[in-house]
Image (cartoon, helix red, strand yellow):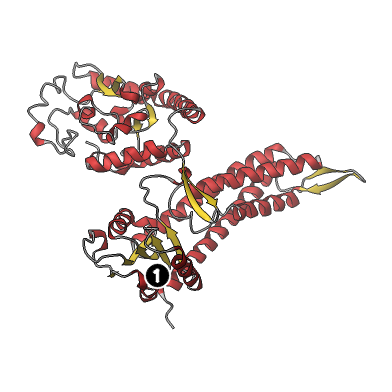
Amino acid sequence: MTKSPALQSTNWARYYRLRLGITDGILITIAVFGAQLIRFGASVQEFQVADNRHGQFATNYTMISLLVIAGWMLSLRVFDTRESRVIGTGPAEYKLVVDATVRWFGVLAIIALIARAQIARGYLIIAFPLGFLLVLVSRWLWRKWLHAQRRHGGYLHRTVLVGTVSKVNHVAQQISRDPSNGFLLVGAVTDSAQNLGPALAGIPVTACFESIEQTIQETDADTLILTSADVLSPKKMRRLSWALEQRKTDVVVAPALTDIAGPRVHTRPVAGLPLIHIEYPEFSGSKYLMKRAFDIVVASILVIVLSPILLVVALLVKRDGGPVIFRQTRIGQNEQPFKMFKFRSMVVDAEARLNDLLEQTDGNGVLFKMKDDPRVTPVGKFIRRFSIDELPQLFNVLNGTMSLVGPRPPLPAEVAMYDEVAGRRLLVKPGITGLWQVSGRSDLSWEDSLRFDLYYVENWSLMGDIIILYRTVRAVTKSKGAY
């Protein structure tokens, strides 16, 4: 007998979590016993544990290794690091792995302190970082595998959208932007079958809210996304949730909030109502001081490590007789102008020749970009391809006018055309890289560039910056959208 798609969806999620659990267990075991082997060799080492009644008793590191492994796996389980709501997309899975690991390390330290156990520090210094790194890498590899399966139509949640036409269109469009999110739209229930967007093309749409259960049954959906909270009365919503519970169908509510990340969204139960609390984005304070410190440390290290490359590129650029560094006025945080540094990649009179090329732009309507710009020098073409021309911006980071990660630094002429929405890009420092850099670069439309920058401004975090920096390395090596 063939299983229904909904049942298959439930099975893939369960088996995927099982695979994560088995992988976590294997890697943690390798890390912990590997640390024991590195620190003590093949011999069985003992250490003393205090006992108030009998003085001290001895135990060996094999026992403590088993305890570390069991506690670590339990911590990963307790902190829901393998739940369906966090696996597959977003940074929540990685953050939970970090939280579970750090907390178990703290618990173990407290246990050792209370028991006055003299555990070798070298053993722990090897075991925890190694196990932590291996688990994070394995989670990343499993996610890449999951995304590949989803691109081929597998490992997806069969989803029905419910709400007004405008909101269903909006949510469908957002979901269709990225197939790796794991939602496969198989149906929609709205207030009208008219004015349906392209994201709903080919999907059965019913214009009757009384047929929600029937639609879910006919489409074998395992997930319902409610896009409009006012289309169903509280009583109908309660009865619907009871009916969906029997079918093991997940209910997801999509509030009318776009481009607001999870850390800013909190539920606040009040008198049985799950109210949603939205925190304001932070543009100052301790988090920003941490971001500044991170910028200074990383930029300093990069300048030291990359100094041979900086010197060689400077000599190559200088060969044609022009200046090595190109300084251009850009607009920074709070609309303050500053000079942005780049290796010169064009002929000396490039600015004077710009007006003759404006009609040939390959840009997005606001920015001038040209794939085969005749002003680019041979050396400039190479350093642009791999974004080497932007390395001097590390000194902008050090002098405080830019950040490692942030919105793209705009020209004064661009800022003159900004409306109130686009102006929010200037609430934070511009960055050498950002979501725009890792999501298409010059190939993006103006709307998409603005959307990525505003998302970053509204939801930035230090962990998000680290992820963007990692993705930048991949984007630069592929050189897609760089010209």
User: Which residue is at 70% across, 44% downward?
Assistant: 107
User: Which residue is at 75% across, 44% downward?
Assistant: 111
Q: Nearer the viewer, residue 230 or 315?
A: 230
Q: Quadrant of the N terminus?
A: bottom left
Residue that mark 1 sits on: 221
Q: How many marks?
A: 1
User: Which residue is at 54% across, 44% downward?
Assistant: 133
User: Which residue is at 57% across, 59% downward?
Assistant: 21
In the depicted structure, whether residue 180 falls above or below residue 50:
below
- For the question of whether residue 156 can be seen, the reply is no
Q: Nearer the viewer, residue 90 or 260?
A: 260
User: Could you say which quadrant of the image residue 230 lies in?
Assistant: bottom left
In the depicted structure, whether residue 415 falls above or below residue 141:
above
Q: Position of residue 154 (x, y in %)?
A: 38, 65
Q: Nearer the viewer, residue 79 or 98?
A: 79
Q: Position of residue 320 (x, y in %)?
A: 18, 19
Residue type marked 1: Ala
Question: Is 466 on the left or on the right of 29, as rendered?
Answer: left
Residue extending farthest to the bottom is 1
Residue extending farthest to the right is 53
Q: Position of residue 363 (x, y in %)?
A: 17, 38
Q: Nearer the viewer, residue 29 or 339?
A: 339
User: Could you say which quadrant of the image residue 401 lies in?
Assistant: top left
User: Could you say which quadrant of the image residue 450 lies in?
Assistant: top left
| Secondary structure found at label 1 | loop
Question: Is 405 on the left or on the right of 418, as rendered?
Answer: right
In the depicted structure, whether residue 13 falls above or below residue 445:
below
Q: Quadrant of the C terminus?
A: top left
Question: Is 250 on the left or on the right of 50, as rendered?
Answer: left
- For the question of whether residue 389 can be seen, the reply is yes
In the depicted structure, whether residue 108 falls above or below residue 355:
below
Q: Position of residue 100 (x, y in %)?
A: 60, 47
